[in-house]
Every structure is written in structure tokens, then in C-alpha cells.
Amino acid sequence: MSNQKIGEDLKWKKFQVGNGGSVCLVDWMGDDYALAEAARVSYGEGTKHVNSERGLIRYLMRHWHTTPFEMAELKFRVRVPMDTWRQWIRHRTASINEYCLAPGTRVLKADLTWENIENLQKGSELVGFSEGPPIIRKNNISRCSVLKTTTLTAPCIRITTEHGTLVCSEDHRWCVRARKGKMFDWVHAKDIKVGNSLAFTAHPWKVEDTYSAGWMAGFLDGEGWMSVDKNRSMHLGMAQKPGKVLEAAVDFLYQHNIPFISYANAGCKTLAVSKRWEAIKLLGLCRPQRLLDKFYSALGNIGGLAQTPSKVLSVERLGKREVIGLSTTSKTFIADGFLSHNSTRYSVAVDECARTLPGQWRLQAPGNRQGSKGNLNVKYGDILTARESELHSLSRKTYEERLEYGVAREQARKDLPLSNYTEAYWKIDLHNLFHFLRLRMNDHSQQEIREYATTIGNEIVSKLFPQAWEAFVDYRLEALILSRLDVEVVQRIMQKNEDFCGRLAMRRDLFMECQDETWAGLDKCRERDECFEKLQQIGIMPS
């Protein structure tokens, strides 16, 4: 199976970690072949004798030639407790970003009104959708709630499309189709190019406070219907006998550029709004209460994100500006009519914490002040788990109470426990990821972060870069490094044990008998030769 097929199967696949954490691959660049090609370009003639892909990668790892491994990158989304995240971000060679929109960006609410992003509050209900994949075709339109809003300053971009202009941070993500016929996917604003297409639904509408809009609302509530069929398709229509009432309804639809089809049915004429987002717009601008209630109840069952590709006409960098970060329960929302991804790195600030089950409380290791060994008796674990639950509840209640009094969010959250979960996008090159995994997969690493590292390594990296992973395991993860002092100790032992050294020198073929099975049968093997040289240096093999 190709790296591309494996990667597409892994993208957005969520791997559970612990009681409530997770990690998934968002995107990646490169494969084993790309690593080898980068080395050939870098080292040129120096690699002419190490030309097999696997052999070259192992040579690079063995001799600490790290630059080629920096040519590959991986991006993950992790859901992790804050105390574990504090250890994680000590690895400063990765990118962690916040994704935000400019004030004045209008966001579609679940009641089908539009609100400026800066006016949204925690708990506001919005129209969202599942983040995919695949985006567009199989995803339900659903309700979601605002978890958090944040104001900050970030480098921004202005994107002008056929259907409007967007101002956002460089790392904000939009639903984009890069080429004709290519599936929509999430793309950072800084990577969007002229000619790409953004997924667009409908221009924001204003609620009409006019006689004709009020009349249309009454007509729809009295003579109209809204339904969702077994295929999750939404239908909106109305029926009336030919006459002035029907003519007034037709005029309203024409005046507001809402396409419809009409057909005769049992002496009446039926008007059916043919496009989903135009039907939603009709409900939102004239607000028939009965049908609005039906739409609200149907959110979550309406399938597909029928949309119009909106071609990008220009992309302009604006420098640093103030932007608003918005986090929702669905990780998605609709901004100025465009399908938008969650705009902050923190998805859950208060409502969920990492829980410790009664049998999971670990005891302090006697010989390692930063480690643990064994588990506490479950009888005492029950007590500690109950106290933990009380503490989480009190901290959440205290935080929400501060917000009710108007305390600034940045100050109100200062006493939240480190067991709170946060969600982050984490991008890193393969060289620095291997360094992270070597430290965090080690038995001396804290169990919580070790579980994340093990999942990333075994479930994702090993499948995307199998030859590089093999070399990493052999030369880093499971290798033993001897210091100068270690080498000198071995040499002194060998010198004192003259009888053993003499017998070993007489049996030089012992090394060949004990060689690794992957070397056997090869007339020339650089890796085998280097191993023998190391044993010669410390006095185990004869010079």
C-alpha cells in the first residue's frame, strides 16, 4: 500500500488516549523515498555507495545526519490534559497555532440570524456541521454551542472571492477545493492561492421588519411546510389556489431572488423552494415561527452541505491585526456564508477534565522522584476519585460565577485545574518528532505523555515512514549509547581478562556467526563493518 493511500486512511482517524484524550493525523508531507532523495541531493557523491533507500536511511540515522529528516512534516490534532500539555510544549521545535477571524465577521446562529463574531458569548447556539472527512457530501447540518471566545493580535490575510471578502489570521482554516474535480479539504489561509475555490453557502441576510415579510411569515406558517426525508434532504414549500394570495407569495420570492419551482396539485398550485440554502435564507429573513421551530428541531438530521464553489480572486497579507478566536462544540461554524473551522487552539476550557479511575492512582517510585511504580489500593482510590470529582465541580462553578460577575475571562480561568482538557494543532518535522518520541516513549517518561507518544509513533509514524521508523527504533529508541567512561571500563575489563581475550582472538569468525540475520549472505555490508569496528574500539574483537 502506498504512503499516499495509508496517509489518506489515517487522516482524521481519532486514536483514543487515556480516559478522554485523543490524537489524530491532520496532514503530512513526504515519505521514505523523499528522505532518501533529500540526502542524495545534500551529500551527492558521498552517498554513491549507499544507494538503496533503506540502506541510505539507516546510514543517515546511524551517523546522525539529521537534515534529510527535516524535509518531512506531520501535523496532528491532540486532545490532552493541561498538565501533560505543559510537558509537551517544552519541545519548542514545533508549531502551535491559534486560528481567528476579524471583528465584524458575521456568524450564522441556530435561530437563523447572523451575529458579529465579537458579540458571541459562551453558550450561544450556532449552525455547525461535522468537520469530516469527507467535507460537504456526507456531513449533517447541526446545532453547536460556543465554548470560548478570545481576542488577540495575529498576522492576518485578506481573501477576496467571487462572493465576498474575508479577513482572518494566517492559520485560520477554510473549506477549500484546490483544483476542479478535487475533493474539498481544510486549508490554512496562508496556503490558499488565487484560483482555489472556497465552499460558500449564502450571503448573510437581515431579518426583515416589513409588512410583506410579516405577511409571508404568516402565509408560510399557515399554508407551508418544512420536512426532511429519509435521505436527509430538506424540503420547503407552500400551496395555494391561484389568485392574489398566491401572486403575492410569488412576488415576494422574486423580490428576494429565491428560486422556486411551481406545479399544479389537486386544484392548488405548489411553490417549492428548490435550493437548500435559499430555503434556509427564506426562513431566516421572514421568520415563520412554526417552521423555524421545525427547522431547529431538524438540525442534526439535515444531510449534506450543498454549497457553491467561490473562486478566490486575490490574497493580500495585512500584517498584525486584532482578531477574535471562536471555539465551538462541533469545531466548525459558518462565517460570512463560508464554511469555517474552529478558530482557537483550545476547544474545551472548563467543561471537561481528565478523570482518574479508582484503580489508576499510582504510587511514588522509591528510587525516582519524578516517576511512579505500582498502584494505590482501590479502597483508597475510591476516596481520591470522589474528591477529584468534587474539586472539578467546585472549580467549574467558581469559574462560571466569576464570568457572571463580569470578570475578564483571562483572569477568571486562573484557578482552573491542570486536568482540564485542551485541543491543539501541533506541526513538527520528522527529525524533531523522532527526538520527541525518543524522550517521551522512554520508560522514565511520565505515563500520561508516554501514552500519547506511543500512540503517535506506533499508530501513525510507523505506517507513514516504515523504513525511517525501523531505523529510529534500531538506532535511537532501543539503542544503547556508551560514553567515553563506559568504553574505558569495558576496555579495562577486557585487558584484565587476558584468557578470554586470547580465546576470542583465535575465533574471529565468532562475530560472523553472531551477526544480525539481515546482514547474513551479503558480501559487503557497511552496517556490519561499522559494528565490527565499534567492537574493536572497546577491545571485544581483535584489531
Image (spheres, grey):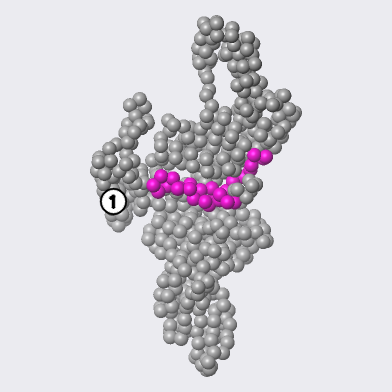
Image x and y of residue 269, in percent = 54, 89
In this rendering, the answer to whether 218 lies above or below 54 is: below
The answer to whether residue 174 of the structure is visible from this angle is no
- The one of 324 and 433 positioned closer to us in this rendering: 433
49 relative position to 183: left or right: right
Asked whether 177 or 209 is in front, the reply is: 177
Instruction: In this rendered view, identify the residue nearer to me: 254 or 518.
Output: 518
Residue 297, position in %: x, y?
41, 71
Q: Quadrant location of the C terminus?
A: top right
Was residue 319 drawn as part of the magenta stretch in this picture? Answer: no
Above or below for 231 versus 224 = above
Task: Indicate the position of residue 12 as horizontal and vertical percent values.
Answer: 53, 52
Residue at numbered disc 1: 393
Q: Residue at x 39, y 63 (%)?
A: 124
In this picture, residue 22 sits left or right of residue 365: right
Q: Start and end of the magenta stretch?
A: 8-34
The residue type indicated by label 1 comes to Ser
| Residue at x-position 45% and y-position 59% | 330
- Residue in the picture at 63% in, 43% down: 30
Residue at point 40%, 52% (across, down): 348
Image: 213 above or below 416: below
